Image (cartoon, rainbow, N blue to C red):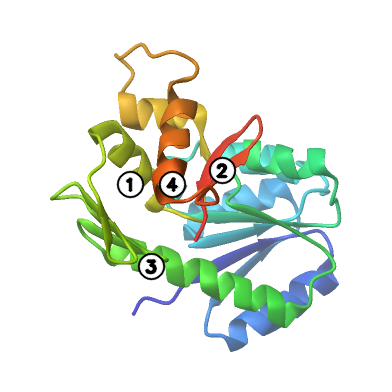
Amino acid sequence: MKEKTILLVDDEMDILEILSYNLSKEGYKVITAQNGVEGIEKAKEYLPDLILLDVMMPEKDGIETCQELRTIKELDNSLIIFLSARGEEFSQLAGFQAGANDYITKVVKPKILVSKINAFLALTSKVANQSSILEVGDLVIDKDNFRVTKEKQQFLLPKKEFDLLYLLASNTEKVFKRDEILEKVWGNDVIVGERTIDVHIRRLREKLGVNSIQTLKGIGYKLLI
């Protein structure tokens, strides 16, 4: 199995040292950077599987850095997680809007953080290795046969509902923005109303359970497992 690479971007050397030590012990290749500009350069060079990013940094802050990283095609499959002392709701929303997969507030114990990272990377590897069938929690989604099974109960969903569910299930660590959902499920050439996504999300919740899909107000949707 290919060694996973993690890029740590933080201006605090003690944090870089502690996290580098703990992640290296887990078998990861760890690259470090001390500001956003250096982080972007090293991300382009190493194409890491996961980028752990601080918010408050010199030269280029974490939000700007994340936005720029998300414009780099080669990093489309890289996970980006914020690790920041800024725990305010607006800071977390800004992180998700910039394209982050998750936002973790300091102080978090290194072993807990490593466990979270292990879970993130294990899940994305599982999804990447699957072909037409996704198994997410108690859901089994068969793309070839447009069939969804939950706890031995089978659902036959309309195509757009199925496509929306499959998209959300393709990466349960990601918050899918409304524009991205419209583009990937309905396509750029199809004009749909503002409430189209909401209606389809509501129908999926009715069929799969009211807590199956999380709404991040003003951002998008995420499948819960």
Q: Give the CA separation, mark 1 to mark 2.
A: 25 Å
Mark 1 — residue? 166
Residue visible at 63% across and 56% down?
A: 81
Q: Are marks 1 and 2 in contact (CB under 8 Å)?
A: no
For numbered disc 2, what is the local secondary structure? helix
- What is the quadrant of residue 65 in the picture? top right
Single out the mark in the foreground, 1 or 2. Answer: 1
- What amino acid is labelled 2 in the image? Leu
- What amino acid is labelled 3 in the image? Ser
Q: Give the CA separation, mark 2 to mark 3.
A: 21 Å
Asked if residue 73 can be seen in this view, the reply is: yes
- What is the quadrant of residue 197 in the picture? top left
- What amino acid is labelled 1 in the image? Tyr
* Quadrant of the frame with the N terminus: bottom left
Q: Are marks 4 and 2 in contact (CB under 8 Å)?
A: no
Q: Which mark is residue 76?
A: 4
Single out the mark in the foreground, 2 or 3. Answer: 3
Mark 3 — residue? 125
Question: Which badge, 4 or 2, comes first in the chain's sequence?
Answer: 2
Q: Residues within 10 Å of mark 3 (few under 14, many from 20)?
A: few
